[in-house]
């Protein structure tokens, strides 16, 4: 992290710190159902409070499209935030057309914490409006961005404000950048990337960047079906992109030029219907019938991957192997995830994972805590893997 400013580079004692967190968390029945992002924001809040700062917390929540929407107020997150921080948190309910937040911020005492309402209630937030950025900057003396998951967006609260105040990365963002740099920019080799998901078309940039940086690229999910079809294997009614076969071949050719091995399934689990507990069978690649669809990797593929992992030092994972949301077609993802987690826990490799489906799959397998780092970012994680510059990160460079 020596290329980025962190909170250690800021003098915060007795000062108001504007903290951009990501509190865009799932809510049901008026309660937060997954507080992971809240807990990670709390780590930075507690670190700043311990150093004598008062903290003004900003976040978006849903897509209110530039106007006040009661159901998208951050007030619903307040109890979870207070619990995670371990102290009372003041709340300012505002649509950002008034000066309520600014007036409340000026009354804060050292070690106070205040949560402002949804920044997306203001129409200028997503336009990176300079006037709104100035309003946000007037809330404090310095700025800390802890929302890596929103860093791919140049918004007033992520990028605009950083031009107006001394700025740094928060604890979570610093850890996220460090983990990703360790995995991709200066990894211990060999490096294996595991990329799943439905479509090649949505991950062309990702695959193109990874073949230049990793030693082995394991392809799973619906994407693997497209690659199998491109290699002449029957895939029946499997999810795939018939118009992307040439793209798959081009990626394989580029990988070959770069010395990156493309790893595809050697056997599969095929079923007649896309539904939980559908009748299924394990078959070789040339045995999939026209009425079947591939829903998971087979035991031979799992065994081959587990053996291959024994010689790997870094794993970057984005996307499940099969229809992991349907039992028993989560078996391949769970088995490989548990093997990666065991090796990471033993210190034998560095394992970094990210993306919504990936995090859900790792949680279902009960192994998230054993990975070296699990990113809660979706789009930002993908854009980083694609080699793109993230506005919210770039502005924090020294």
Image (cartoon, rainbow, N blue to C red):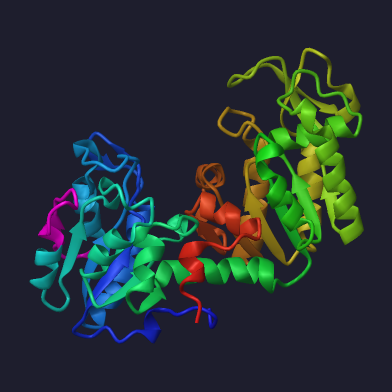
Q: Please give the name of the residue rendered at 71% of the width and 14% of the height, measured from the top-left corner.
A: 272
Q: Nearer the viewer, residue 377 or 67?
A: 67
Main SS of residues in magenta? loop
Q: Nearer the viewer, residue 96 or 70?
A: 96
In the orientation shown, which residue stands out farthest toward the top? Answer: 291
On the question of residue 266 being in view, the answer is no
Residue range highlighted in magenta: 85-101
* Left or right placement of residue 231 versus residue 351 in this view: right
Q: Position of residue 201 (x, y in %)?
A: 70, 38
* Residue 83 sits in quarter: bottom left
- Vertical comparison of 2 with 30: above or below: below
Q: Nearer the viewer, residue 225 or 115?
A: 115
Q: Please give the count of numbered marks on the rendered protein.
A: 0
Q: Position of residue 219 (x, y in %)?
A: 75, 44
Q: Position of residue 149 (x, y in %)?
A: 46, 56
Q: Please give the name of the residue rendered at 65% of the width and 60% of the height, measured from the top-left corner.
A: 387
Tell whether position 88 is magenta.
Answer: yes
On the question of residue 386 being in view, the answer is yes
- Vertical comparison of 274 with 349: above or below: above
* Residue 54 sits in quarter: bottom left
Tell whether position 24 is magenta.
Answer: no
Q: Position of residue 220 (x, y in %)?
A: 72, 40
- Vertical comparison of 23 with 347: above or below: above
Q: Please give the name of the residue rendered at 50% of the width and 78% of the height, measured from the top-left corner.
A: 4
């Amino acid at each position: 992290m020596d290329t980025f400013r962190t909170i250690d580079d800021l003098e915060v004692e007795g000062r108001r710190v504007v903290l951009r967190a990501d509190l865009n968390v799932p809510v049901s029945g008026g309660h937060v159902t997954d507080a992971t992002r809240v807990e990670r924001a709390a780590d930075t809040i507690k670190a700043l409070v311990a150093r004598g700062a008062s903290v003004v917390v900003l976040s978006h929540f849903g897509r209110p499209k530039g106007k006040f929407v009661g159901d998208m107020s951050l007030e619903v997150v307040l109890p979870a935030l207070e619990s995670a921080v371990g102290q009372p948190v003041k709340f300012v309910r505002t649509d950002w057309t008034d000066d309520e937040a600014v007036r409340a911020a000026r009354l804060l005492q050292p070690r106070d914490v205040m949560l402002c309402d949804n920044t997306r209630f203001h129409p200028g937030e997503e336009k990176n409006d300079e006037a709104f950025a100035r309003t946000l900057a007037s809330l404090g003396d310095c700025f800390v961005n802890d929302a890596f998951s929103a860093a791919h967006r140049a918004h007033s609260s992520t990028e605009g404000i950083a031009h107006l105040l001394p700025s740094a990365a928060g604890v979570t963002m610093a850890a996220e950048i460090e983990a990703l740099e360790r995995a991709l920019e200066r990894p211990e080799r060999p490096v294996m990337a595991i990329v799943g998901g439905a479509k090649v078309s949505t991950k062309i940039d990702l695959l193109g960047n990874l073949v230049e940086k990793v030693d082995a690229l394991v392809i799973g999910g619906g994407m693997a079906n497209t690659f199998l079809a491109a290699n002449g294997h029957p895939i029946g009614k499997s999810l795939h992109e018939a118009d992307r076969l040439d793209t798959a071949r081009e990626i394989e050719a580029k990988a070959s030029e770069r010395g990156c091995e493309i790893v595809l399934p050697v056997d599969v689990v095929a079923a007649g219907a896309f539904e939980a507990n559908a009748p299924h069978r394990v078959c070789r690649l040339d045995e999939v019938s026209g009425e079947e669809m591939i829903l998971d990797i087979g035991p031979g593929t799992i065994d081959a991957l587990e053996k291959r992992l024994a010689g790997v030092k870094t794993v970057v994972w984005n996307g499940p192997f099969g229809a992991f949301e349907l039992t028993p077609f989560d078996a391949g993802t769970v088995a490989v995830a548990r093997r990666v987690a065991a090796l990471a826990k033993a210190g034998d490799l560095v394992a970094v994972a990210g993306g919504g489906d990936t995090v859900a799959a790792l949680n279902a397998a009960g192994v998230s805590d054993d990975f070296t780092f699990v990113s809660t970012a979706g789009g930002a994680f993908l854009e980083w893997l694609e080699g793109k510059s993230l506005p919210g990160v770039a502005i924090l460079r020294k």
